[in-house]
Image (cartoon, rainbow, N blue to C red):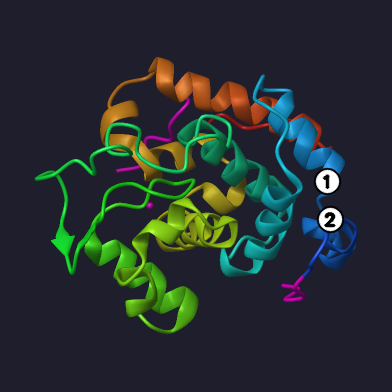
C-alpha cells in the first residue's frame, strides 16, 4: 500500500489541568491523558509531561481538525518531527542559531522551533497573526515557541490548518496524504521511502492508542 498519496496540500473550552482537559472536548475529539501518554510511549518515546498534554488539548480548536482520526494523524506527524516531543528547536541551530541560514530581524533568528519546527520570519508572522491577532507577538519573541508549551503546540496546529488539513485525502483519513503535504518533495517522490514508512509506523500505534474503530489507511 502507498505511504504517500500520489495526487496530480469545536468545543472552545480552555482547560487548566489534565482532569478538566479530558472532559472538555466533544466526543469526537475527546482524548484522555492516558490515551495521549500511551500514544507517545507505545512508540518508545518518553512519557510526556502534564503540561504537554494540557497544551495539546487546548490547541485543538485552532487546528480545524474535526475527527479523532485526523487528530491521530496530526500527533503522529508531530511525534516524528519532534523526536517524540523532546525536540523544540532545530537541533543544528539550537546552540548557535545557524547564522546565515535563516532570516535575522530585530536581534532574532527564525530557525525551526516548536513541535512542527516552524521556520522563516514570514511563517512566524502568519502564525502569530492567526493565533494571536498580531504578527509582532511571535516576531518579537520567536524564542518562546521553543520554551512555552502553548506556543509550541499552537504553531504546530496552525501549520496543520494552513498546510495539511485541506490537502486532498487528509480529512478522509489518508495518512500518506498528510505526509505528502508536510514533506512530499523528499519523502513522496517514489513509493517505499523509509522516512514515510517510519511516520506510518508511528501512526499505527497512535491510531490504536486512541481507540479508533476500523483500520489506519496508509494511502
Classify 31 as above or below 41. Answer: below
- Please state if 165 lies on the left or on the right of 204 as rendered: left
Classify 134 as above or below 100. Answer: below
User: Callout 1 environment at 10 Å: few (<14), some (14 to 19), or many (20+)?
Assistant: some
> Does any portion of residue 202 appear in the rendered image?
yes
Q: Residue at x 55, y 34 (%)?
A: 86
Give how far across and how far down residue 13 sits, in percent.
Answer: 77, 75
Q: Which residues are magenta?
A: 1-14
Query: Helix or strand or loop: what does disc 1 sit on?
Result: helix
Q: Residue furthest left?
A: 100
Q: Residue at x 54, y 58 (%)?
A: 148
- Please state if 23 lies on the left or on the right of 28 as rendered: right
SS assignment for the magenta stretch, majority: loop
Q: Quadrant of residue 143?
A: bottom left
Instruction: Give residue 33's mark.
Output: 1
Residue 146 vs residue 121, the one in the foreground: 146
Q: Residue at x 24, y 44 (%)?
A: 97
Name the residue beneath numbered marker 2: 18
Amino acid at each position: 500500500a502507498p505511504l504517500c498519496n500520489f495526487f496530480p496540500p469545536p468545543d472552545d473550552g480552555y482547560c487548566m489541568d489534565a482532569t478538566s482537559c479530558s472532559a472538555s472536548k466533544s466526543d469526537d475529539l475527546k482524548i484522555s491523558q492516558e490515551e495521549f501518554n500511551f500514544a507517545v510511549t507505545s512508540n518508545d518515546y518518553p512519557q510526556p509531561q502534564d503540561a504537554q498534554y494540557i497544551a495539546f488539548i487546548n490547541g485543538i480548536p485552532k487546528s480545524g481538525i474535526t475527527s479523532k482520526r485526523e487528530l491521530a494523524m496530526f500527533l503522529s506527524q508531530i511525534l516524528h518531527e519532534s523526536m517524540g516531543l523532546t525536540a523544540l528547536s532545530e537541533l543544528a541551530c539550537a546552540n548557535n542559531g545557524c547564522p546565515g541560514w535563516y532570516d535575522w530581524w530585530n536581534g532574532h533568528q527564525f530557525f525551526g522551533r516548536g513541535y512542527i519546527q516552524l521556520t522563516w520570519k514570514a511563517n512566524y508572522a502568519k502564525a502569530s497573526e492567526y493565533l494571536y491577532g498580531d504578527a509582532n507577538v511571535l516576531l518579537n519573541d520567536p524564542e518562546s515557541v521553543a520554551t512555552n508549551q502553548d506556543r509550541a503546540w499552537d504553531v504546530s496546529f496552525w501549520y496543520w490548518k494552513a498546510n495539511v488539513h485541506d490537502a486532498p485525502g487528509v480529512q478522509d483519513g489518508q495518512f500518506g496524504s498528510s505526509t505528502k503535504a508536510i514533506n512530499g518533495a523528499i519523502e513522496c517522490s517514489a513509493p517505499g521511502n523509509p522516512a514515510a514508512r517510519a511516520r506510518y509506523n508511528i501512526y499505527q500505534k497512535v491510531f490504536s492508542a486512541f481507540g479508533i474503530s476500523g483500520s489506519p489507511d496508509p494511502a
